[in-house]
Image (tube, rainbow, N blue to C red):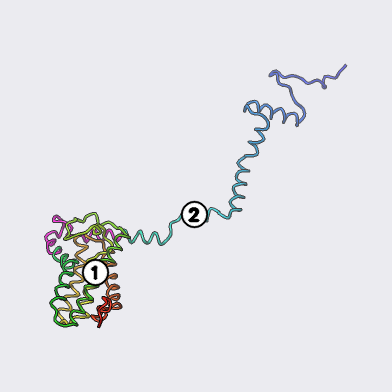
Amino acid sequence: MPSPKAKNPVRSGGSPVVSSSSDRFEFMNKTLLQRQGSDPATARLRASESPTRRRGSSSSTGSASGQGPEEDGIRLNPSFIRVALSSLLAIDLWMSKRLGVCACEDASWGSVRPLMKLIEISGHGIPWLAGTVYCMYKSDSAAGQEVMLNLLIGLLLDLMLVGIVKALVRRRRPSHNRMDMFATFSVDRYSFPSGHSTRAAMCGRFVLTHLVLAAPLRVLVHLWVAIVGLSRVMLGRHNVTDVVFGFWMGYVQYNLIEMLWISPLMLQRLLGYDV
């Protein structure tokens, strides 16, 4: 007669009682698979993709490639040069807006706008070209003609270089500017650099070097150069950096004229005349 202990009793719930630990684990695993509706292979695949293994694999991949979180943070930070340039540009726009007090008649200094426009014409290229040609034609001495000839070459060089730089940079004029300038061209819709500033700096150095002037007149030439540059910002034609770069460019252009100085004899040789 079998012993009652050998039998597997059945509980009221209808599930057999498993005495072995391995049988109990297998039974629970199968029950879990039935609840999830998947096969054992899928369960093993999910177990292999546990968060612990994923964290380990990502850390190993990051260490293998040599790109840790610190390097990613450094790469996302903008460079110091870019931040500095952006800050300088913001300051330039702010100063230009504050100094544009003659940009229109309704501005704080709108009553001074006609005087600023007169100063603008005094630094325009057309009056300087016409005046240089007239002086060269009326001059009786060879030295005077030589000086006026090189000034004419410098003015033409200034127009060419400023046009090239404006076409390359293509910086728009300030938003508060009114396009009512005297005798403008297609390239004049750009503002960098200021052509009036380059011309004023170059012609000012040229006049002070090659013309004999009294002390009061020399002071007036310096004041004229400074006022021409300031009027460009006050009228809203240019930003501050346009004028500053224009002064530097005019200074360099004068040095270039001195290096390429053309005498009447050299001009005759270039034109092919026998001396």
Position above or below: 144 against 198 = below
Position above or below: 152 against 169 = below
Disc 2 designates what residue?
Answer: 73
Identity of the residue furthest to the right in this view? 1
Q: CA distance from mark 1 to mark 2?
A: 52 Å
- Mark 2 residue type: Gly
Residue sitting at x 65%, y 39%? 48
Earlier in the chain: of badge 1 and badge 2, it is 2
In magenta segment, residue 100: yes
Quarter-of-image position of residue 102: bottom left
Most common SS among magenta residues: helix
Identity of the residue furthest to the top in this view? 1
> What stretch of residues is rendered in magenta?
90-116
Q: Whole-percent x and y of residue 168?
A: 32, 60
Residue 9: mark: none
Residue sitting at x 68%, y 31%? 40
Residue sitting at x 67%, y 35%? 44
Quadrant housing the C terminus? bottom left
- Mark 1 residue type: Leu
| Element under disc 2 | helix
Give the mark toward the camera: 1 or 2.
1
Q: Nearer the viewer, residue 243 or 133?
A: 133
Q: Are marks 1 and 2 in contact (CB under 8 Å)?
A: no
Residue 156: mark: 1
